[in-house]
Image: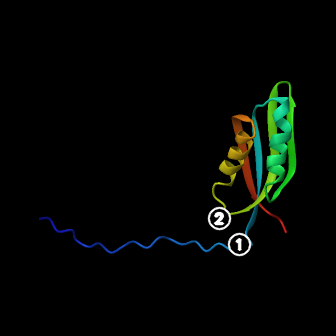
Amino acid sequence: VAEEAEAPAEQPVAVPVSPSDKLIMFFQADGTMSESAMPAVRQALEATEGISDLKVQISEGIASVELTKQTTIQATGVASGLVEIIQGAGFKLQTLNLSIKDEEL
């Protein structure tokens, strides 16, 4: 019978993050969608908190969704959540561009 030596549990590294650390995420998705899906995509995103500068368009057969979203450092998964929203409304994603910057007060 092998005995396991008890190793001291490693403490996770905690980085203090203030909820006031606001970031602006620029989200641009290109892909395809039907004209009839545009209102559903727009409405789904308009119902999402913190979104501004929303553009949903189709130009020369390429659909694009552009927006800015307020978030915090702690808000992991925000972009994937937005992708799920637009795909659920009929958008077929091909490329995604993201950039994040500190909100300037």
Query: Who's the residue at 85% across and 69% down the image?
Result: 105
Total labels: the figure holds 2
Residue 75 is left or right of residue 89, and the answer is: left
Element marked by disc 2 = loop
Element marked by disc 1 = loop
Crowding around mark 2 (Cα neighbors within 10 Å: few <14, some 14 to 19, many 20+) is few
42 lies above or below 61: below
Q: Earlier in the sequence, mark 1 or mark 2?
A: 1
Q: Is residue 7 visible?
A: yes
Q: Are marks 1 and 2 in contact (CB under 8 Å)?
A: yes
64 lies above or below 21: above
Crowding around mark 1 (Cα neighbors within 10 Å: few <14, some 14 to 19, many 20+) is few
Callout 1, which amino acid? Pro
Q: Which residue is mark 2?
A: 74
Query: Who's the residue at 65% across and 72% down the image?
Result: 17
Instruction: Check the image and name the residue furthest to the left.
Output: 1
Q: Is residue 67 visible?
A: no
The quadrant where residue 93 appears: top right
Residue 46, x across and y down, in percent: 84, 51
| The N terminus: image quadrant | bottom left
Residue 1 is left or right of residue 18, and the answer is: left
Residue 51, x across and y down, in percent: 82, 55
Q: Which residue is mark 1?
A: 19
- Report the Cα–Cα distance between label 1 and label 2: 8 Å
Query: Who's the residue at 84% across and 44% down the image?
Result: 42
